[in-house]
Structure formats: structure tokens, C-alpha cells
Amino acid sequence: MPGAKPGTLSIAPDAVPTTIRVMAYDQDRVIEQDIDDPQELALLLGHWPVLWVDVVGLASEAKLRTIAEIFKIHPLALEDIVHVHQRAKVDPYDHNLFCVLRIPDDSNEQLTEQFSMVLGKNFLVTFQERPGDCFGLIRTGIRSERSAARQGVQPDYLAYRLIDAAIDAYFPLLEGIGDHLDRLDDRTIAAESRAAFAELHSVKRELLMLRRAIWPLRDALNELRRETTPFVTDAARVYLRDCYDHTVQLIDLLESYRDIAGDVRDFFLSSISNRMNEVMKTLTVISTIFLPLSFIASVYGMNFNTEVSKWNMPELNWRLGYPFALLLMVIVAGGMLLNFKRRGWLTGDPSREDHELAEDNETRRHGDKENRVRR
Amino acid sequence: MPGAKPGTLSIAPDAVPTTIRVMAYDQDRVIEQDIDDPQELALLLGHWPVLWVDVVGLASEAKLRTIAEIFKIHPLALEDIVHVHQRAKVDPYDHNLFCVLRIPDDSNEQLTEQFSMVLGKNFLVTFQERPGDCFGLIRTGIRSERSAARQGVQPDYLAYRLIDAAIDAYFPLLEGIGDHLDRLDDRTIAAESRAAFAELHSVKRELLMLRRAIWPLRDALNELRRETTPFVTDAARVYLRDCYDHTVQLIDLLESYRDIAGDVRDFFLSSISNRMNEVMKTLTVISTIFLPLSFIASVYGMNFNTEVSKWNMPELNWRLGYPFALLLMVIVAGGMLLNFKRRGWLTGDPSREDHELAEDNETRRHGDKENRVRR
Amino acid sequence: MPGAKPGTLSIAPDAVPTTIRVMAYDQDRVIEQDIDDPQELALLLGHWPVLWVDVVGLASEAKLRTIAEIFKIHPLALEDIVHVHQRAKVDPYDHNLFCVLRIPDDSNEQLTEQFSMVLGKNFLVTFQERPGDCFGLIRTGIRSERSAARQGVQPDYLAYRLIDAAIDAYFPLLEGIGDHLDRLDDRTIAAESRAAFAELHSVKRELLMLRRAIWPLRDALNELRRETTPFVTDAARVYLRDCYDHTVQLIDLLESYRDIAGDVRDFFLSSISNRMNEVMKTLTVISTIFLPLSFIASVYGMNFNTEVSKWNMPELNWRLGYPFALLLMVIVAGGMLLNFKRRGWLTGDPSREDHELAEDNETRRHGDKENRVRR
Amino acid sequence: MPGAKPGTLSIAPDAVPTTIRVMAYDQDRVIEQDIDDPQELALLLGHWPVLWVDVVGLASEAKLRTIAEIFKIHPLALEDIVHVHQRAKVDPYDHNLFCVLRIPDDSNEQLTEQFSMVLGKNFLVTFQERPGDCFGLIRTGIRSERSAARQGVQPDYLAYRLIDAAIDAYFPLLEGIGDHLDRLDDRTIAAESRAAFAELHSVKRELLMLRRAIWPLRDALNELRRETTPFVTDAARVYLRDCYDHTVQLIDLLESYRDIAGDVRDFFLSSISNRMNEVMKTLTVISTIFLPLSFIASVYGMNFNTEVSKWNMPELNWRLGYPFALLLMVIVAGGMLLNFKRRGWLTGDPSREDHELAEDNETRRHGDKENRVRR
Amino acid sequence: MPGAKPGTLSIAPDAVPTTIRVMAYDQDRVIEQDIDDPQELALLLGHWPVLWVDVVGLASEAKLRTIAEIFKIHPLALEDIVHVHQRAKVDPYDHNLFCVLRIPDDSNEQLTEQFSMVLGKNFLVTFQERPGDCFGLIRTGIRSERSAARQGVQPDYLAYRLIDAAIDAYFPLLEGIGDHLDRLDDRTIAAESRAAFAELHSVKRELLMLRRAIWPLRDALNELRRETTPFVTDAARVYLRDCYDHTVQLIDLLESYRDIAGDVRDFFLSSISNRMNEVMKTLTVISTIFLPLSFIASVYGMNFNTEVSKWNMPELNWRLGYPFALLLMVIVAGGMLLNFKRRGWLTGDPSREDHELAEDNETRRHGDKENRVRR
């Protein structure tokens, strides 16, 4: 539950055991080690221009508290670190800058996990819910590539690189959803199964989830970019503007997909209606033809006694009574068919209609292109 | 009715009798007592760093007026205290700061009750509509736990703790609604009963109620955080920012649930349409097969006199007349069935379709995961 | 028509004859009189701290012009006074402050009438379209109650009292609409008649009317509160903040009702669909059972000559032919019924479903309460 | 095409020949003349306090260029004058102030035409697409009425008068649409024809057209009012505030009509559904009654040989076989009818329902009024 | 993928080979040449007041890097140049101003391609994805027309000309969509085919694409106009305001088309419903007439033995039994028809209804015009 008070860190019951990995580097050296006792961090702090403490798993209250003490993390920030349903945000504190982001994580129903950062003068502490992240390339960069490390000998530049990687990791996710919507749209044109709509329904929910993760990101980055805090240098601000632009692009994509999902739904519902219309037309055509015919046959199936009087069903004894009845039926059926033809109800052949559709689309595309060229 | 004038406090007819409970504490001492005559409060005021007067029930105009006099509560604030349909707000007055919040209360159709606070230099007066609240833990904290009391020897910190508890109390309420929506969604997939839609309808109304309670909270907290009033210290402002963040999170959750409710409604309506489609297909298939068959049978049930001429229903006297008629029927029925098969109208078996749906979802999930991994 | 030019006051054709009533008071004295010749007002002006000129009916151009001259009302303001379709607004002029409000008036299709105020140093001139208003209590207060008059010996306080009364008069109107929506909602659950939808339609229009009256009120009050005009004292500003809060509350209520009306409409439409579904299921079940049965009966009603060959309808001469045919029919009907039962189409009994609904709601409520308590 | 470059004025192909009419006046004199050679304008300029050049028709590039030279109209402004699809806007230039408005024009599919104004120290040049405008009254005023001319001896006051007249000309247009919507709404209650919906569709498009004309007007007027330009005097600003208010009122009206159009559409669609429901009920009632009856009749029309055994249709030889069959039919039909009555499906008489509707509305209105009075 | 780091320019796999074309000019001279080795650009830079480097195709990393070095393009800007899914934006850097636009390109599914500009003191470098653009006229202008070149001897003026041409190129595209919507609307009135809806669906998607291209353009232009950068002169700012106005107009048009598309969809869906209604009415009328008639015929087709008793179907032996039965049928059918006529169900002739529609529209138009004239 959010907002528990200092003194009672309410750690989520399904939290993963805490592991701590440290990378510290300057222009010349890099060390990298797994640390078990967080007290060791106090020894490293201050001896490197950039100390990156990567905490994965939030189960151990004791470790988290020790880290918080060493890096002077505010109790409210610590609380937000373990309550893993935070929106992206930036909170400046006296001794450091606290950021929360959400990064994509497909092992999760919410599609994202919380990623918290505490940025200080010469350190960056990051907290993730679960192992497995999108920062592998950055670690490799720190280890080997001298150029990136040289540029990044500031913790704020490292923070930028992490934020940038997090934002970029959303793009394939969103594009996957976009492809999915396209496939659904195609399936809707082909045939409307209930399954397709259920799928659309779940895509919309995924978009909602991502929306809740991405929108606050924009505000947070904007704040980070504008925040007059000593922990972000002007050089890093230029890079953060770039992150901000990417987030706006993500939002753009997201909102477009939401619009498209709405359109696909509209199209889907209209397809159902169209289909129903087609079914009803078939029923109506068949009924309207055969009900009168059956009626005529029934009439001549009546058992009135023709011998009592000449008024009682004389047709039965006509020489051409049966051909007369059949002719009557043909006339009625033909009249009905003509009527339907005039109303255009007989074009219910779905394959032909689809064909028309395709042709029509073709025509339109060409037409449009010509339009565009012509102008 | 709101806005009645000074001199005529229009107390709600169903107001609960007023009881007054006082907690006063400094770093070393705590007293706690029920007070009957509000005049006693004047004796306590000023002798403790924090005096919390908790007024429950708003029926007694005399008591409320006495309290208002002792703590210099403005007539307009007093009016707002008894008109219990206020939105959350913050009104700074000369002698104190007046806040209105709404706290969850499930004994009520509106799901919330009004909670007013008057914050002064060394006191906090709170007003609730009914007994029963979400502040039990805070009272326990004041009584026993020395650490929390030590931190909270300011009335504004106590106010923060109360606001924070009020906001946190909304989370389980909203999560309950979220779970309810999930259950409704599942029921919609399984079968669409009218009851499920009525339930969805009432969930939407609950969300609307909560919306009216929570949105103003955000503005109020923002104002409280920015207000340059002597009654809120800078230390408390940091905590209020946290409350503000939680409220934004609540709003986020709330709006997501509203979106989801809209989606579930869409899905529900499309389910009805789909179902109707299925019903209509069945009717059409059955009618389209049996109407022509019945017609054929009717024809051979006609009573034309076969003895009058050889044109009158010679089939009746054919050796294989009956098998011929049956064959004709089989051909007609078979032709119709083929036609329906080609149109795909015979796949109306709902269990199979649902099965497909599940399978399909499975496939999609895998596909998505692969997509994500591939990139 | 709005915006006619000075020199041609375009008075509405259905305007009511103009009557003028004056109240003037200080702490000790009150006079109250009906005035026929507006020139008399010039004699009163300046001799009382508060002079309230209440003009009812806007038919007499001559009278209005004389009043405008005495109180230095700007031509544009005078124009707005007689064009009674203004939105609420505040226009500061050099010699006075001009406000337009709309007050509830149920004799009118628009549900409101225009109420204009001209506030000066020591006078308040008000204009109403028709007799009958919501200010009776205020007049009584001025006459007798010394306390209210003592407080209100400023024209701006009187203006506040009038605005406050106007805003409060909207609450019962809106609450009436809220109750109406609730009744409509109940009727929708019980049965969906066309009448209920038509009613909903007209409630939505009423809400739209009120919306146009209330939204601008908020902006006007905000402007009034912020306006740095000598005609509003700081003391009155505190009260105007209260009016502003009430207006925001009105808007809140109004928008909630609009949302609820939308929800009721959704629910209503889904009810129609559900009902249609039920009707269609009945038709389909009946048709699907009786069409095959009738077909079987028709087959054995054919007149093939059984004496020609043993292939021609030998069943007719079987000893148990008729029981055999009946058995066949029972088997077909039973098979169909089983099929429908499996699909759940036989639960179309509306009374039972409604019962379920009620029960279900009951369950849910209990469940929710438990949920809330549990947490 | 918009945005063509200086040097190539792309005049619309359907532009009307250019005519120029001049009015020049001071407090004492007025001259009014049609001018053929725009060079004559140079002679008038500077000799009158107000010189109004009214250019109608934009076909002659030469004339327009000459005017632009004389009055120092910026090339971009001249471009905007001939590209007649501009939104309302205000562009301050060094030598004059350029405004674009749209005025109602029913000879046009877009319902409006472009009206451009160039306001200088002592002149006002206006450009219209076509002859025929809403400024007749203003011209008459300049000619004869000394009072208006006296006030208006400034070009900015003249500009205000023109803007005001343009805005006022929208009111009857919008009110006409409002009346149309009301008529459509009434027709929807009476009967839902396809034509009514098509009409609603075109009303919505008209509203969209007007929306595009009116919304930018608000921004333009706001800018004009705030613009610190030497060409608008403070005295005129008071009047422009009035124009601004009227535009806001127009927007208000427009948006209300859009909401109403949406509501009428909803109501319309629900009417169709209701109607369909009624049709379906009739079909179902008839089918459900006559299908079983026909089945019974068919059974007793079977030709089983009653002489072969006593099991073969003994009813046929019962003394009361026929009455028994008829009784069976009556019982079945009666049972079905009872069932339908219980479900309320037999109240499909539309005239009665409409009657109920009217009555119901009546009741509601009364009830509402009582509600309002009661409070 | 966006946001790759410096050092690893992730060029799109389908990028086109890079070609470089240079135009450099002053008031008197123009040179124009294709350049293969970008190093040659360093020789030109600084020797001309305006150097336009037009880079088409983004496949060659080496060339792009060289250009970036010569013109001091920031690594982040270079990144954005090759990641061709950017939104329009303006990023000021120390040594130049970086802009991204999207220009129409119909060879592309997204309808647009990215167009980046780097504006410096005396150069403009532009990057396009593919050959073929809308700047032909500008190039011709630079070459021959001395007047335009004289005005444009500043790189910021050239940039304005390019932006203006890009914006203008959107108008025909949008107008094409507008025409398409009109055609679709007409087709919807004539008949509702599934194809028309599919087309509408794809038009909506095109609008969404364009929306994503055009909306950011507005913000970018606003920023460009306001940006206090040394690379844009005040003279160019006046022109950029014009570009901004055109973009607002584009957005206006776009949003109108989106509204219209929504309206067409509504109208379309209501057409389907109307059509379904008509189909259902036909079915119901036919069924309701022939089911009772068939029932009567079936009754007299029963085989009760009339010789057993006088109660068994005495009608069969009546002299006028058959005429009696026929009369009974005529009465039943006539009664049903009367009933339907009273309900107005017999006016289902679509041609007549359409005729009415057309007539009705005619009437309305006339009525409206009269309305407008009358006022």
C-alpha cells in the first residue's frame, strides 16, 4: 500500500531478493563487482567520479535502509522505491535528485516495471524490481569502449544514457502493438469472428497500460530538463531534451494507435451490422418467396368436397389444374424476385462484394495518386 | 442547502450528535479525553504545542459555534463545515487555514463523507460527519510510539499524516472497483447477461462519485503545497508533495478504470450483436432449409384429380414418385447447406468459437513475446 | 438582436412593463418605496450609504434611459441589459462595475432569466426580466434584522448577498434533475419504453441550457474576485470566493449529471438490444422447432399413390406409421431443445432474469462491502 | 493555392470583377463616390479624418496592386486578401493593421465569405469577395445620422462598427439552425424517416462550417483588443471588448447546437432501434402463434391409413375429432398469448405508446414545476 | 531505432544512396553543382552569402559524417536526421539551428517523408529521404528570377521559402481527402455497400497519418518564430508568422475532415440500421399475412372423417365451403394489411423514399435560404 510511514517499509510480498552490483569508473579505470554487504559502498563513495550502484530486487529491507543511509536517500524517496506502482516523476531533495521511471517488462501483466534512480554529485543508485533489463549495451560501453566512457565521466550523463535506453525500449513494444492492430484490421475485413474483437479489447487494455507508463514520463523529463538542481549539468540538459523529444514521439505513436484501435472497433461493429443485414436479407428473400408458394400449395391441399357443388375447388378437376397451380407459383416467385432485384437485395454474395471492395480500393488508390500528381 | 447566511447555520436533518475528543501532546506527554462542554477547550489551547480537537457528528449548533469562537473559525468556514457536500478545497483565513477533504465512507451512497480541518499555530480541529474513520493508526502512533510523536510535534505534520491516511484509504476502494471490472470483463466473455451490464452501469456511477471526490483533492493539495501561509512549515511541504503525488496516482488509476469501463461496455455491446448474429444465422439456416422442403411436400399434398388428365400431378402415380420427391428434398437441402458452408454460416457453435478465441489469444501472446524478443 | 447601436435600444417585443422599487438603508433607518418617475432617484442618490434600485421589466426605454443617465451607466452596458441573452460577465467601467448573471426562472423555456447589476460607490441598480425572484429573504433581512443590515451597509456586500442567493437557487433545480435521472434509470431497468428515452432526451437538453447559464458564471465570479476595481472592497472579496466555490460545485454537479445521462442512455440502448435479442431468441426457438415438425407432417400429407408400388410412402400403411411419425417429431423437437439448452437460449424468461439481476446486485454490494472491510 | 510568392498573386478563377466605392467624412461633410482608377485614392488620402475604401470583388490584380501601394499594404497581407480561405486573424504591420474576418454569405457553399480590413491612421480599406453585405445600416448612418458620424470620426471606430455588424449577422444564421434542429427533433418523435437523418447530417456540416468561421474570430478579436498598436485607440478597445463578448456568445450557441445535434442523432438512432424492436415483436408474436397451429393442422392432414390399425390417427374417426383439434389450437394460441401478455409484448400499438409519451411528458413537466415550487 | 548513441549511426536499411547538390548565390551570381566528395563543401563555405546544400538519400554514413563535421552539426541532430520518424521540431544549438519538418510524399505508406534543415549564418543544409520534392519552383526562382534572389540573399529567407512550399504542398493532399469524403458521403446516401465503409476507414487512417505530420509542425513553427536565435533575422520572422498561419489553417481543415469523417460514419451506420429496418418490415409483413392464410388452408386440409359425425369439418361438404374459406382468407389478409397501413409499414418502397429525401432536401434548402433572406 502506498504512503506507509517511515519506520514501516511495506515491501511487496512478491518482491525479488536484493542483489547489488557496482560499477565505478573514471577515464582510465573501471571496476565492476557484486556486493553483498551494502556497507562496502561507503568505502567506494567519493573515490570515483562515477559510482553506479545497481540494486535489483527489493525484498531486503535491511539492505535498502543501509543504502539509503549511505547515499542520504530521503525516507519518502525510499518509500516510493519499494511501492512499485509509482508514476514517472522527479523529486529534488537536498542531497540528491530522485527520479522514477517505468521500463518495459513483458514478464509482467502491467507490461512495465518500476525503475528508480537517485542521482548525486558523484554517484547514481538505481533500483529495479526484477533482473533482466534494457541496459546491457550501456554496461558493455562502460567496460570497453573508451570513447563513451570518456564522455560519460559524469553521473548525470550515465543517467541520461539509462533514461534514453529505457525510452527506446518502448518503441519495439509499441510497434508490435501497431502491427497487431494492422493484423486485426485485416482480419476484420476478411471475416468478423468474436475472437478478433476480444483480441482488440485486450490490445486496447495494453495501450492503456502503456499510456499510464509513458505519459507521466513526459512530465518527469520536462521537469528534469527544467529543474535547477546542481546534480544535472547543462551539458546533460541538451541530451535530456532529446529524451524528451523521443517521449513525445512515443506518446504520439501511442495516441495514434488508440485512435486506430477505435477506428478498427467502429469498422468491426459496422461489419457485424453489415453481416447481420446480409443474413436478414437472405432470410427475408427465402421467406418472402416460399411463404406465398406454400400457401398456394396448401390451398390446393384443402379437402373441400368437389362433388357437393361446382363452387368447391373446381380447379382440382380442371384438366390443366396442376400446371395452372405451378404457373401461378412461378408467377408469384418471379414477381417477388423481380421486386428484390429492383431493391438490390439479391447481391448478397459475399465473395463478389469483397471482390468489389478490393477493386474499389485499387481504383481509389490510383485515383488518389492521380489527384496528387495532377495538382 | 449551501450558502445559508451567518446567523442561521442550516444543519443537515440527518446529522449525527456531536462528540468531541481531544488529544494534546508534546515530546514527553500525551493527554487524551472526551470533552462535553467545548468551553473546556479554551483552557487547553495554548498550553500544548499540538492540540488535536476531533469533532465527530455535526448536529449540535451550540457546540460548533463555541468551538468556532474559541479557535476563531470564520463564519464562512463554519458554514462549509456543516454543509457536507463541499468539494475538497483550501481557504486561507487570517487566524487559521481551512481545508476540506472527502474521505471514503462506505456507509454512504456517495461513497465518501466530508472531513474538514482547521489548522492553526498550535492546534488542529477536525470535523467528521459520522463516527468511524481511517485514522486509527495515527491515534495509536500519537499515544505510544515516541518516534512518530517526536517528528510530529507540529500541528501541520499531524495534518499531513491525516491527509495522507485519507488518500491512502482510497486505494483499496479503487482497487476493489478495478477487480470488479476485471470480473465483469470475464463474465462478458463467458456470456452476456443483462445483469452484468446493469452492474457495469453501477460501477461507472461509483467511479463518477469517486471522481468528484478525488479530482478536487488534487487542486486542494496543490494549493496547500504552494500557499504561503504561516500555518504550514517548509518541512511539511515536502511531505505534502508526496500526498500530491499519491493523489495524481489515484486520479490516474481512476481515469484508467473509466477507460476500461468504457471498453468493457463496447465489448459487451459487440457481444450482444455477435450473439444476435448467431441467433439470426440459426434462424435463417433453419428457415432457408425447411421452407423450400415444406413447400415441396405441400405441392405433393395438393389434391388435383389425377384421373382427369395426365397433366394433373402424374408424379403421384409414378412408381418411384415418393423416392423422387425425397431425393428432390435432399438435393435442395444439400444445396442450401453447401451455400451456407461457403458463406461460413455453419460455424455457429459457440463452444468451438470460444475455444478458438482462447487458442488465438495464446498464439498472440507468444507471437508478441517473440516480437519483443526478436527486436 | 444583440449589438444594436447607441440611439436605438432594441427592446425585446415580449418585454414586461417596467416597475421600479427602491430600498435605501443605513445602520439605523430603512426606506422602501415604489417609484414611478425615475427622476426621483436622483434625489435619493448620495444620501444613503446603500441605495438599491430594483428594476423589474424592461419594456420602457424612457425609464431605462433616465436611470442610465442618473447612475452613469455606459451605453454598451445599457444595451446588454435589454438584450436578455447575455452570458454571465463582469465589465468594469469608469463610473461603476457592470455584472450580468442568469438566475433560475421556470416560467421560461431557457430555464433562466437575465439579472444585471450595476454596482457603484453607494448604490446598486439591478435589472430583471420578469417579476418573481429568489431574493425575498434578502429583502426581509434588510427590513427587519438589524444584524444583517449592520454587516451589509456596503453596496458590494448587498451585491454578494444577491449573487449568493442566485447561485443557491440553482441547487434545487439541479438536484431535481438528478432525481429525475435516477427515476429514469429505474424505469430503464424495469422496462424500456420509448417515452423514457424521450424524457431522457429532454433532460439532456435542460442540462445543456443550465450549462450555458452556469459555466460563464464561474468566469464572471473569478473576474469579479480578481478585478482591481474600487467598487468591490476586500471584505466582500472573501465572500465572493465563497460564491465562486459554490459555482464550481454547481458545475461539478452539472457535469456529473451529464455523465450520468450519457450512462443512462448507454444502458438504455443496451437494454433495447438485449430485449431484441430475447425476442429474436424466442422467434428462433419456436421456428427452429416447428418448421422441421411441420415439414415432417407435410411429408406424410403428400398424396403419392401407395398402391402403384411399394416404394410410395409405405409408412402410411404401416401398423405403427402414425406413432412412428409422432416419435420422429418428438425426437427432432427434443434434439433441438437440447441444442438450445446447451447454448443457453432457453433462459429467456424475463422475470427470472430480472430476479437474478436484483440478487446479483445484492451479492455484489455485499461483496464490495466485504472487500472494503477486509482491506 | 495559399502562400504563393510575391510577384505572382494567384487570384481565384471565380473571382468577381473589382469595384471600388469610397466614403470619406468628417464631422461636417460626407462624400461618397465610385472610383474606377485607384490612383484617385492617393488624392483623397490624408485630406479626410476617415477615408473608407470599400473594394468589392478581387478579380483585378492591377487595381489591387495599386491600392496596396497607396496604402502601404504588405505583400503577405495582399496575398491573404486574394486567397479567400483565410481564418480570422489580426496581423500588425509597420504601416497599418491587417485583419481578416469571415462574414455570413448564403450564396456560398461554405456559408461565409472573406472580409479583409486594412486599418491605418486615417483610413480603412475593406475587401469583400462578392457584392451584397451586412453593412447597409452603417453606410446609411455615415450618410445621414450626424450623431453616429460624430462619434465615429475615427477609422478604428468605423472598423469596430463593421466588425460588430459582421458578428451580429451570424446570430440569425445560427438561430435558423437552432430552429431547424428543433423541427428535426419534432419530426424524430413523430416518425423516423431516412430523410430526417440526412437533413440532420447536413445541419451538422453547416455547423462545422460556421464553427471554422467563428472560432478564429474570437482569437482575432482578443488579439485586436490586446494588440498594442497605434491604429486602435483606447476608446475603441472598450467597444471591441463588447464584440469579443458577442463572439463568445456565438461560440456558446454554436457549441450548444452541436451538442443538441448529437443528442438528436442519439435519439434518432434509438428510435430506429425501438421501431425495429416493435417490428420484430410483431413478427415473433405472429410466428409463435401460427407456427404451432399450422403444425397441428398439418399433423391432422397426414394421410396415414387409419384402416390398417387402431394406432393410425384414430382422432380422424373420433366423433368430436375436429372440435378436439380446434380446441387444441385455441388452447395453444391462448397459452402463447398469455405468455406474451406476461412479457408485455402485446403493447406494440404505436399510437397508444405515443399517446403515453405525450401524457408522460405532461406529467413530468408538472412534476418538475411542483418540485421547483416545493423547494 | 531512435536514440542510438553517437558512434553508431543506425541508418535505416531501406535508405536511398546519398547525393549532394549545391546551390550558392549572391545578388549577382548563382552556381549550381552536384558534389561527390563532401570535403569540397568546406571550400565553398564562407565564400557565398547563401550556400544551400541539398542532401538527398541518407544511406552513406561517411558522407553524412563529413557534412556534419564541416557544418558543425551536433551528434544528436545528426542522429535525428537519419532516424526518419521524427516529429516536426526546432532545436537551437550553439553553431546552428536544427529543424525537422515532414513533407508530403505519396510514394510512402505514411504519406510523408522527413525533411531536416540545418540553418547557419551563411548556409542552409537540407536532408531528404528520397529524390522528388516540392521545391522545384524555388530552385527555378534562385536560378533565373533576380527579384526573388535579391530578396532572398539570406539563408533564413531561403529556409522560409522551403518551409512555405512544404506547408503549401499539404493543401492539395488534404483537399483530395475532402473530395474523397464528399464522394463517400454521396455513395452512402445512394446505397450502403461494405466497400464504402472500408474506404472511409482508410481515409480516417490517412487523416491520422497527416495529423501526426501536421500538428507538430505548428509547435515547431511557433518555436521557430519565437526562438531568440541569431540564425533567424527579424525580417524572416514576419514571413514565418505567415507560415504559422497556414499551418493553423491546415490543422483547421484536417480537424474538420476528421469531424466530417465521423459524421459520415454515423450517417452510414444509421443507413445500415434503416435498411435493416426496411428488410425486417418486409419479412414481417409477408410472414404476418401468409402464416395465418396458410394456417387456414392447413385446417381445411385436415383429414377428419366427415362421415363419422356432423361435427367433423362440416364446412368441407358445404355448397360454398371453398368460397367461404377464400373469403375468410381475404378478410384476414385485408385486416392485416389495414393494420400495417395504419402503422405506416407499407411505405417501404426505397425508390419512393429516396425521392422524398431528395425533394425534402430541396425544400429545406429553399426554406433555409428564405429564412436567411427573411431576416
Image (tube, coloured by chain):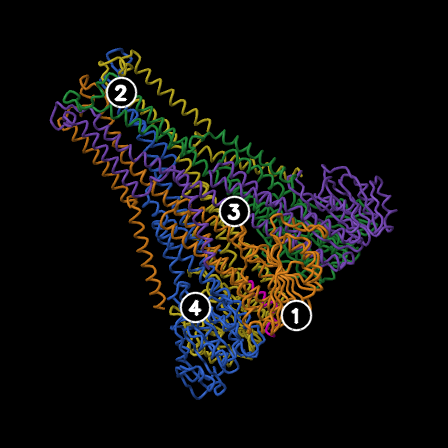
Chain colours: A green, B yellow, C blue, D orange, E purple
Name the side, left or right, on which A239 lies relative to B13: right
The Cα–Cα distance between marks 4 and 2, rounded to whole angstroms, is 82 Å
Does E304 appear in magenta? no
Residue E203 position within the rendered picture, expressed as x and y whole percent measured from the top left: 57, 42
Q: Nearer the viewer, mark 1 or mark 2?
A: 1
Which label was assigned to residue E262?
3
Q: Nearer the viewer, mark 1 or mark 4?
A: 1
Residue D137 position within the rendered picture, expressed as x and y whole percent measured from the top left: 53, 65
Above or below for E214 versus C182? above
Q: Residue at x 32, y 15 (%)?
A: B323
Secondary element type, mark 2? loop
Does B219 appear in magenta? yes
- Foreground residue among E277 and A104: E277
Residue E120 position within the rendered picture, expressed as x and y whole percent measured from the top left: 80, 53
Q: Which residue is mark 1?
A: D48
Secondary structure predominantly adopted by residues drawn in magenta: helix
Amino acid found under the numbered disc labelled 3: Gly
Q: Nearer the viewer, mark 1 or mark 3?
A: 1
Secondary element type, mark 3? helix
Name the side, left or right, on which C213 lies relative to A288: right
The Cα–Cα distance between marks 1 and 3, rounded to whole angstroms, is 53 Å
Which chain is home to disc 1?
D
